[in-house]
Amino acid sequence: MRCWICGSARLSPVGELTSGVQPLDQLRLRFRRPGFFKPRPEFEASRARACRDCGALFPFLTEYDRRELDAAADDLIETEDAAPRHYGPSDSPG
């Protein structure tokens, strides 16, 4: 496995990933609510590797959450804040 940022092969072993706020808090991958009465999809990332050269962190979902993500993937909605932004010159006049 190589770092997705710098390409280094110097990655740490897999370690436990916590938020540090509460003892049992885990980082979660969250998506927009698919409907008004439907729960917000979220998936727990409890393990991670770190690049020893650039410091990038690569979280991993639990096996249960990976299967849940796979089952829900077609219905997930990207969060509005995560949409790519274009800051270059505009194609429209004015």
Image (cartoon, helix red, strand yellow):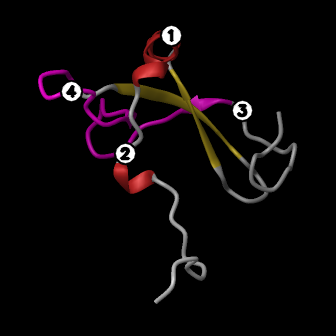
Quarter-wise, where is residue 49 in the image?
top right
Q: Is residue 82 left or right of residue 34?
A: right
Q: Which residue is mark 1?
A: 67
Q: Is residue 9 magenta?
A: no
Q: Which residues are magenta?
A: 14-39
Residue plotted at (68% across, 56% down): 55
Checking the image for residue 35, the label placed there is 4
Residue plotted at (59% across, 82% down): 89
Measure the C-alpha gap from mark 3 to mark 1. 23 Å
Q: Amino acid at mark 3?
A: Pro
Which numbered mark, 3 or 1, is in the foreground of this view? 1
Checking the image for residue 79, the label placed there is 2
Element assignment for label 3: loop
- Vertical placement of 73 versus 55: above or below? above
Q: Earlier in the sequence, mark 2 or mark 4?
A: 4
Q: Earlier in the sequence, mark 1 or mark 4?
A: 4
Cβ–Cβ under 8 Å for marks 3 and 1? no
Q: Amino acid at mark 4?
A: Gly
Main SS class of the magenta portion in the image? loop
Measure the C-alpha gap from mark 2 to mark 3. 31 Å
Residue plotted at (86% across, 49% down): 8
